[in-house]
Image (cartoon, rainbow, N blue to C red):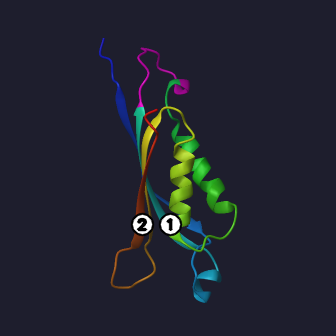
Amino acid sequence: MVLITRTRIILDDFMLPVSIGIHDFERTGPQRIIVHVELDVTSPETERDAIDDVVDYDFLRNGIRELVDAGHYNLQETLCGQIVELCLTKPSVLRATVSTRKPDVYADCRSVGVEMTGERDSD
């Protein structure tokens, strides 16, 4: 039996429409946002093969959808920070690194975005 003490969970390039931006042209309709999440989690020392023992991917996707559906964001920093906070609501999440990117802002860039990392206090 191998005991795994840490696991990294990845939600890679989750693309969804978001009402975001400070410019007038950004307020006319939703923009594409790409969200990337990496979670360092403690893993159960169990041989069970049960979803209740891990952080469910649906929790991430549905939670992010709920955040973006709740209203308009002026800044990517605000959205990104709220996603980090969402991730850290799960007790097994030790660290959450989240990036958001807007792929349609500049024609000469693949995307513009922010990245934030939040960690659980060790106390």
121 with respect to 4 (left or right): right
Label disc, if present, on residue 55 of the rendered structure: none
Quarter of the rendering occupied by the N terminus:
top left
Q: Is residue 70 magenta?
A: no
Residue lying farthest front? 123
38 with respect to 25 (left or right): left
- Choose the circle earlier in sequence order: 2 or 1: 1
Q: For mark 2, what is the residue?
A: 114
50 with respect to 43 (left or right): right
Residue lying farthest bottom? 24
Question: Could you tell me how far apart the alpha carbons at marks 2 and 1 are, in whole angstroms?
Answer: 6 Å
Q: In the image, is residue 119 above or below residue 98?
A: above
Q: What's the residue at 47%, 20% (across, down)?
A: 49
Element type where label 2 sits in the image: strand
Q: What's the residue at 29%, 16% (across, down)?
A: 2
Element type where label 1 sits in the image: helix
x, y percent for residue 12? 41, 52
Residue lying farthest left? 2
Q: Is residue 50 magenta?
A: yes
Q: Are marks 2 and 1 in contact (CB under 8 Å)?
A: yes
Q: For mark 1, what is the residue?
A: 77
x, y percent for residue 28? 65, 83
Amino acid type shown at disc 1: Glu
Q: In the image, is residue 50 above or below residue 104?
A: above
Amino acid type shown at disc 2: Val
Near-viewer residue (58 or 90): 90
Q: In the image, is residue 8 above or below residue 118?
A: above
- Assess disc 2: are there few (<14), some (14-19) or many (≥20) residues with their C-alpha within 10 Å of its C-alpha: some
Span shown in magenta: 42-52
- Assess disc 1: are there few (<14), some (14-19) or many (≥20) residues with their C-alpha within 10 Å of its C-alpha: some
x, y percent for residue 26? 58, 82
